[in-house]
């Protein structure tokens, strides 16, 4: 029965992809005068394919590929439960720089044990960004890679929502480090999302650079604001904004996370742990469980 159900899910997903892939292909992105990225087709379901990798009594794991902004994006979709499960909540997971979708499966397995589906992506360049290169691309009137990465996250949410067992109204974004920056922006641009969980991250402090005179060219400011998660914090409430950060983070100081948290509106929560690492650790499990229960 489990294998039969999994096959039905795959077939339904492929059929849905064929009929629901009317995404725009033109220049359908823009950055507003105040530096806000916009994607008019954010809710469009892209063409995608699912392939079963493994199945057990309490989960199924699929490889998923979909097209976003002219590029094929790969991910792993993990579904909890048995064949009669329905209305399952889901999490779009964006790994930190250099981390693969496989590297995100420790967290995905924990979420699965709590009853949450997930889709984890291999981000473009594995989440590594080239700000100077993207700035020049933007000034040339072309779409920067960092903007495309936000669209990839939105497309992943659309693919997850299109699965027959998923509750389309109960989706959140979650990310680690650089992935959390994209998760914050994607949540702000996805009005259906219930909230965002940002692990081991912070904003870029672009507004401070503007105030100090370090940035003064209007187009340069527009670009840097468009990739700074701090720019989008006002678009998340009343949905939940959650940060989880270690006092001993080896990459992003705890104080930097506090600065971003202070800029966010309610409802919000900052959970502090003491893992001697950067990114997800098991010490964050309790906070994840608590916050996901509140959101979903």
Image (spheres, rainbow, N blue to C red):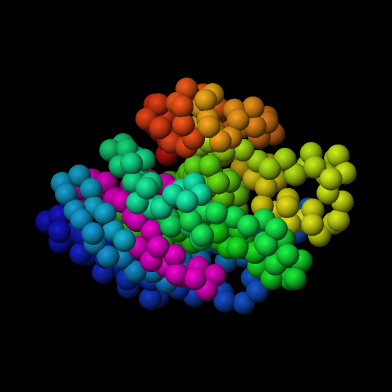
| Image location (x, y in percent) of residue 295 | 46, 37
Residue 22 is inside the magenta segment:
no
Q: Please tell me whether residue 17 is drawn above or below residue 59 in the rendered image.
A: below
Classify the position of the C terminus by image quarter: top left
The range drawn in magenta is 64-93
Q: Please tell me whether residue 85 is drawn above or below residue 275 in the rendered image.
A: below
Q: Residue at (67%, 47%) from the top-left corner?
A: 228
Q: Majority secondary structure of the magenta segment?
A: strand
Q: Residue at (53%, 30%) from the top-left corner?
A: 249
Classify the position of the N terminus by image quarter: bottom left
Q: Residue at (35%, 63%) from the top-left corner?
A: 64
Asked if residue 196 can be seen in this view, the reply is no
- Residue 148 image-quadrant placement: bottom right
Asked if residue 256 can be seen in this view, the reply is yes
Q: Residue at (38%, 46%) from the top-left corner?
A: 104
Task: Identify the residue at the far left of this view.
Answer: 1
Residue 81 is inside the magenta segment:
yes
| Image location (x, y in percent) of residue 72 | 45, 69
Left or right of 22, for residue 7: left
């Amino acid at each position: 029965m489990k294998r039969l159900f999994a096959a039905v899910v795959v077939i339904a997903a492929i059929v849905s992809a064929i009929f629901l892939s009317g995404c725009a292909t033109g220049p359908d992105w823009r950055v507003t005068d105040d530096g806000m990225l916009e994607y008019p087709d954010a809710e469009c379901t892209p063409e995608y394919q699912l392939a079963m990798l493994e199945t057990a009594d309490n989960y199924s794991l699929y490889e998923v590929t979909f097209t976003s902004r002219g590029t094929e994006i790969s991910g792993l979709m993990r579904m909890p439960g048995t064949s009669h499960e329905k209305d399952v909540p889901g999490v779009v997971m964006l790994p930190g720089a250099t981390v693969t979708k496989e590297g995100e499966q420790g967290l995905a397995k924990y979420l699965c044990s709590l009853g949450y589906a997930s889709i984890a992506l291999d981000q473009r360049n594995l989440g590594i960004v080239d700000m100077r290169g993207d700035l020049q691309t933007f000034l040339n009137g072309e779409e920067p890679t960092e903007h495309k990465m936000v669209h990839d996250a939105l497309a992943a949410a659309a693919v997850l929502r299109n699965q027959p067992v998923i509750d389309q109204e109960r989706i959140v974004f979650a990310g680690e480090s650089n992935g959390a920056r994209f998760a914050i922006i994607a949540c702000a641009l996805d009005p259906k999302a219930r909230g965002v969980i940002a692990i081991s991250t912070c904003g870029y402090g672009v507004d401070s650079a503007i105030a100090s005179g370090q940035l003064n060219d209007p187009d340069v400011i527009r670009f840097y604001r468009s990739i700074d998660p701090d720019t989008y914090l006002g678009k998340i409430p009343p949905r939940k904004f959650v940060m989880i950060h270690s006092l001993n983070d080896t990459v992003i100081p705890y104080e930097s996370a506090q600065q971003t948290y202070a800029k966010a509106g309610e409802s919000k929560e900052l959970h502090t742990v003491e893992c001697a690492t950067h990114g997800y650790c098991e010490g964050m499990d309790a906070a994840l469980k608590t916050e996901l229960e509140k959101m979903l």
